Amino acid sequence: MKKILMIATGGTIASKNVGGGLQPVISSGDLLNHVPEIAAKCNVKTIQPFNLDSTNLAPCRWLELARIVEENYERFDGFVITHGTDTMAYTAAALSYLIQHSPKPVVLTGSQKSVYLRDTDARNNLYDAFSFCADEHACGVHVVFDGSVILGTRAKKTRTKSYNAFSSIDYPEIAIVRDGEPLYYIHEEKAKAPLFYHKLNERVFVLKLVPGVSPDIFDWLEKNCDGLVVESFGSGGLPDYGDGAFFTRLKSFLAKGKSVVFTTQVEREGSALDKYAVGKRIFECGTTLEARSMTLEATVTKLMWALATDNVNGNFTKPIANDIL
């Protein structure tokens, strides 16, 4: 049987109400004990580097998870990471850039209700995650949730309460897990060896435009950010309230060697800066990047990764794990 390392990080799946609201307190071993059927699928070892609500996970934790996978890569056939749902899509995207071309699967899962409850989705999600991870065709970074297998760069939490909490944005689901067996829609080609990265630049900010927002926000951005993701309206652009101030400030920001990525607030179908005049004017300000159909989670984490390399623009625009179509 396949040898799988379960990396438990906390989240709702490991939570109990211990006063003051739900908090992750259930250990990795206790999690596994709630689903004894997994033992018939694979041999599992567990490790618990931390036990946190995923709201409290910072980029340093993504690096820690990637390091654990790298250090144990030769000893195991796959990795299951139990994780809170709130930032799971960020972690899945980040690991897609930190662990590239992995011929072994790295699977993230969690639940909308604690494994401790009777009417929970936790046990099914855990069983499905291990079932997929133990499958001979599985590879790369994925989210397995409510029977769906979603590419790590395409996952987004789109519901706060329902069991089908995650959606695959602008890309098909890789597979579904039915009765413990993965049924593939897409067979991914396995690479020969993984490529691990060890650095991220956390000095990235997301600016969500709202009507009337002041360009004075660039005073703070220039001091505190190396990279900026602009969530613009519709197909993409910058507002001009009669003085062209946003374009002037963008040009100044870029001239200081900063990186700017434009994306859209619209969840699906992506940006197209060259469609309208408000978008085309951006190209006059300097070299900017465009996320197109990438999720916000992939855009942010990829920019953090690219900023930590010696070729920011080239690495950001290079398709990785089908993040850019």
Image: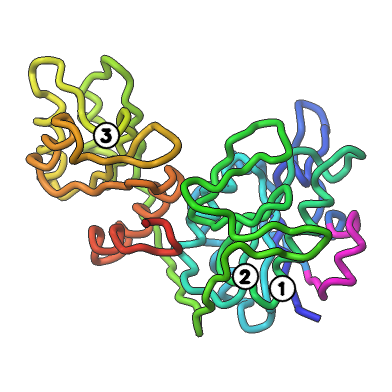
Circle 2 sits on which residue?
105
Residues at circles 1 and 3 in contact by the CB criterion of under 8 Å = no
Amino acid on which disc 1 is placed: Asp
Please name the residue shown 50% across and 77% down the image. 194
- Give SS at disc 1: loop
Horizontal side, residue 271 vs residue 66: left or right? left
Identify the mark at residue 135; answer none if there is no mark: 1
- Residue 32 position, x and y percent, is 85, 59
For residue 236, the mark is: 3
Q: Within the image, what quadrant is residue 235 found in? A: top left
Residue sitting at 54 percent across and 56 percent down?
A: 152
Task: Give the secondary structure at mark 3.
Answer: loop
Range drawn in magenta: 32-45
Amino acid on which disc 3 is placed: Gly
Position of the N terminus, as image quadrant, is: bottom right
Residue lying at 32% horizontally and 59% vertically, measured from the top left: 306
Q: Dot 1, how many residues are within 10 Å of its Cα: few (below 14), some (14-19), or many (20+)?
A: some
Q: How many residues crowd around disc 3 within 10 Å: few (fewer than 14), some, or many (20 or more)?
A: many
Whole-angstrom CA distance, mark 1 to mark 3, is: 41 Å
The image shows residue 138, relative to residue 273, as above or below, that is below
Q: Are dots 2 and 1 in contact, CB under 8 Å?
A: yes
**Three-letter amino acid code at disc 2?**
Pro
